[in-house]
Amino acid sequence: MPEGRSQARRLSQTPPVDQKPPRKSRKKLQVIVCVLLVELCERFTFFGIVCNMILFCTVKLGYDNYLAATVNLCFIGASTLTPVLVGWFAETCIGRTKVLYLCALLHFFGTAMLPVVAFPFEDFYINTHHMTHQLEPREQQILFYTGLLAAALGIGGIRAILCPMGAYSLQGYNQHQLLSFFNWFYWLVNLNSTVVFLGIAYIQQSVAQNLGFLIPFTSVLLALIAIHMMRNKLTYNPKKGGSLLTTLGVFVNSLKMCCLHYRHLSGDVVSWLDRAKENNGGRYSETHVENVKVLIKLFPLYGLQLLYRACITQIPSGYYIQTMNSNLHLNDLLLPIGAMNVISILPLLLLAPLIELVTTCFLSREKTPLAPAKVITLGHACASLSVLVAGLSELQRKLYPLVEQTLSGKVLHVSSMPCFQLAPQYILLGVAEALVTPACSLISFQLTPSHIRGISLHFLTLSYGGGCFLGAFIIQLAYFSSGGNFYPNTLHDGNLERFFFLLASLMAINTLVFWRASYRYIDLSVQGKALTISTLTEKLLHYKATLRFYDTVDHLSIDSVS
């Protein structure tokens, strides 16, 4: 009887089986809601800073157009690169939880600095002698760049730890399912961008002028609340199996072995990367080197995205300056400059469902859809055509007479050409982005083994960030090589169209090169497979290298073991 009562008591304390699935589903729903809330706040702060930075730099800080565009692109590039760097730092140094809190603090600090720079101090800080206290230009610049750097680091930490691409369980998906996921993922991101560009751009430019920089500060508070609510459930722990530092170490060790001519240790090798293997005198195992050899096949894809990304960055730089110097009036309404960015986002919102429908129709009829590599080639062609149209539009814009237009309290002399005539170049870049970005993510994910797919996506992210810095470098090069003529401060006195024609020519060459190299990315039916060998085999290979170093064995066969 006592045993029966205790057993009955244990059974009564055990929750029924039917109650477990609702609890798990409720918990999963809470995690999804919090992740969406954090990502919404993070995107809101990012686009809130980027949205009118050029207008703020030129009107408030007095920067030239080329310098304002360079600052904007460098901030975008830094915000794109920091998730990779902060993610590596979190895994190898102080842990993901501490990095998360540190990045949240940096994000708060950075977004708090921007209102200090943008806030009209003369309206509030008046002493007894009725003298206003304004920040000196040098102090303004120090606070401005400090805020941008802190915000970029904070954005990187939040993206890397709370909302990484690896958090989505994509293992076991076929090619169509992966393409569908990437299409809808970027569709949601751009839907958020549409709301931000319409709302924040109008507030910053027309309603409260510089007070719009308080919006990132407010939205980061929401992100901090979401982190505090679900701090343990929002963090994503990636699977082990490779790191970006190990991949770069294989390259460095291979180059070192080639430069030092250690051929007497390793003899002839099939690939120069094989010199990094332990059995050839290197420092890394057979598995690590073979994984890097799989990744190196994707390097042409990553490298050819640099110039394409430099073209995409014309939306927040060159195209923005064009729009700022065009007629923004629609009847009696002054349109925000960021509203033109919505025109480039509309193709992304419309093409994602259309591509999904077309792909489904092809598969239902047992036909093969267009290969992702060909889709990328078509997108690169659209980007090149967009920049060419921008140059032609600039020639047409300069033919219109000048009119006065007030932006952020400053009267500017701009062209009377309506800004909507610039819409074709925005639409073409939007089509290019809708075609290229999901297809690149699909190829990077599909052609690599499962345990190094995170590294593959990291390299793709590095190419996107590097493209932003390449765009800033091209602007600087064009400005100084032409004496300011190719990127003028007053558009009617220079030739901005020559800059667009130069970029279009480079992008056309980039498209042809990718078209010639795209054959290696056509067949995605066979996923990349890394070499995996037993521990005993690796030890024997290392023993073989040791014997060869002491010149005691000329040939040793390991094939029978492996």
Image (tube, rainbow, N blue to C red):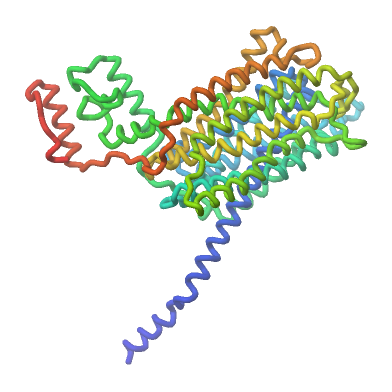
- Residue 7 to residue 96: above or below: below
The image shows residue 391 at horizontal and vertical percentages of 71, 20
Q: State the residue in front, 268 or 411.
A: 268
Q: State the residue in front, 346 or 291.
A: 346
The image shows residue 196 at horizontal and vertical percentages of 72, 42
Residue 539, visible in the rendered structure: yes
Instruction: Name the quadrant containing residue 95.
Output: top left
Q: State the residue in front, 259 or 516.
A: 516
- Which quadrant of the figure contains the C terminus? top left
The image shows residue 508 at horizontal and vertical percentages of 58, 22
Residue 75, visible in the rendered structure: no
User: Left or right: where does residue 278 sit relative to residue 203?
Assistant: left
Instruction: Name the quadrant containing residue 129.
Output: top right
The image shows residue 109 at horizontal and vertical percentages of 65, 37
- Which quadrant of the figure contains the N terminus? bottom left
Q: Residue at x 75, y 24 (%)?
A: 321
Q: Residue at x 68, y 24 (%)?
A: 142
User: Left or right: where does residue 125 sit relative to residue 505?
Assistant: right
Q: Residue at x 80, y 21 (%)?
A: 397
